[in-house]
Image: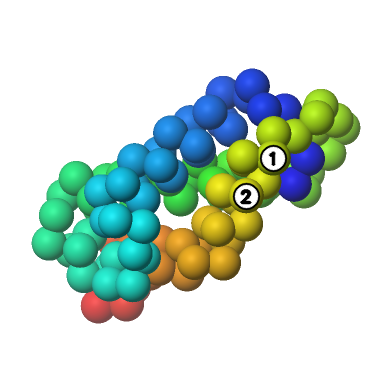
Amino acid sequence: MNVAKDSTKVIKFMTLFQELRNLIDDEPEGLEASAADDKRIKQLCLDLIWVATSLSMNEHWRRQIFAAPVDPTFIEAWRDYEERYAAPLAGVFLSDLDICA
């Protein structure tokens, strides 16, 4: 993902992702259950998935605006998000829609 490191969406992603990781001790297993029991975690998950989805969509649809150098810290966080957090967060999102109920 080639996104400017000072993009407001990147900053928001990094802030929300770090806050979530701190809140759950960087253990995404059981995130859906935690979100079901804790409104703060749930809202944080929903906010994070919206920002991440927006970043991903912008990369796919508007590649020309993503020509600036990328912060390696963001790349590392994004990969961690995709590998360990994307699926549990999708579960939280779907549960919020009552699709998986």
Comparing 84 with 59, the one in front is 84
Task: Give the residue drawn at x 43%, y 33%.
Answer: 15
Residue 31 image position (x, y, % from top left): 29, 66
CB under 8 Å between callouts 1 and 2? yes
Q: Amino acid at mark 1?
A: Pro
Badge 1 marks a residue whose secondary structure is helix
Check the image and name the residue furthest to the left: 37
Quarter of the rendering occupied by the C terminus = bottom left
Residue 66 pos. (x, y %): 80, 33
Identify whether 27 is placed above or below 15.
Answer: below
46 or 97: which is nearer to us? 46
Left or right: residue 51 compared with residue 78: left
Q: Is residue 100 above or below residue 1?
A: below
Residue 72 bears which disc, if any? 1
Q: Is residue 81 left or right of residue 101?
A: right
Give the image location of residue 11, x and y in percent: 53, 28
The foreground one among 64 and 2 is 2
Residue at 75% in and 34% down: 70
42 relative position to 93: left or right: left
Relative image position of residue 86 (x, y in whole percent): 50, 63
Residue bearing mark 2: 76
- Above or below for 87 versus 38: below
Q: Amino acid at mark 2?
A: Glu
| In the image, residue 89 above or below residue 59 | below
Label 2, secondary structure: give it: helix
